[in-house]
Image (tube, rainbow, N blue to C red):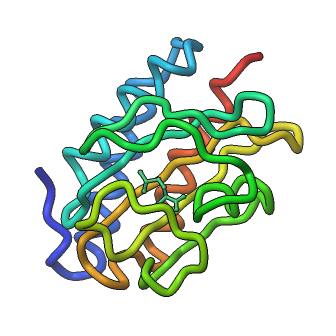
Amino acid sequence: MYHFEGKPTDRIEAYQLLLAQAKALIEGENDFIANCANISSLLNLFLEKINWVGFYINRNQQLVLGPFQGQPACVRIPFDRGVCGKAASTKTIQRIDNVHLFPGHIVCDSASNSELVIPLVKNDAVIGVLDIDSPVFSRFDTTDITWLSKIVDLLTESYTD
Ligand code: SME
């Protein structure tokens, strides 16, 4: 387990190491589900103060639960519902500091108070989303977004239809 409490440079070094580990796991493997499974495990070990991390996969314009770590979650999310649906339908990152204030937020784990959803987009098509929940309000900042986006990029690069 890595720690985020140190100086910002320590945190960036930790993220650099995480990215190297993610590259090593994905390199040479193009099975998207297997790669998502390993990345959800890696992120669960790496990220502090989270209670859920995983993927929803786009199946005919509906998000279907993919590999994850955490409590059992809702299986299907339409593109017009929840934080995940908004990320998928708008192809934009959703950082929600307080999920209770987000209209239409879908509660999967009542411990969640903040959430980060990063869409996986390849050739303008949404492959799915990375969803991370935290019990801490405003858990995610721009450093998290920068580095987690790099990991999402590795996954989209490895994706083949
Ligand atoms: N909160 C999400 C649903 C997925 S769970 O958090 C795992 C949403 O509103 O889309």
Q: Name the residue at 39% across, 26% down.
A: 37
Q: Name the residue at 57% across, 20% down.
A: 32
Q: Name the residue at 15% across, 56% down.
A: 2
Residue 24 lies, with reference to residue 78, above or below; the image says above
Residue 66, given in percent of the width and then of the height, sits at 48, 30
Left or right of 27: which side holds 157? right
For residue 58, which quarter of the picture?
A: top right
Residue 86, given in percent of the width and then of the height, sits at 70, 63
Left or right of 43: which side holds 159? right
Residue 147, given in percent of the width and then of the height, sits at 47, 60
Number of disc labels: 0
In front of the other: 129 or 12: 129
Left or right of 27: which side holds 103? right
In front of the other: 43 or 131: 131
Q: Name the residue at 52% across, 12% down.
A: 29
Residue 60 lies, with reference to residue 130, above or below; the image says above
Left or right of 115: which side holds 137? left
Residue 110 lies, with reference to residue 24, above or below; the image says below
Residue 28 lies, with reference to residue 143, above or below; the image says above
For residue 143, which quarter of the picture?
A: bottom left
Where's the C terminus, which quadrant? top right
In front of the other: 24 or 135: 135
Q: Which residue lies furthest to the right in this view?
A: 124
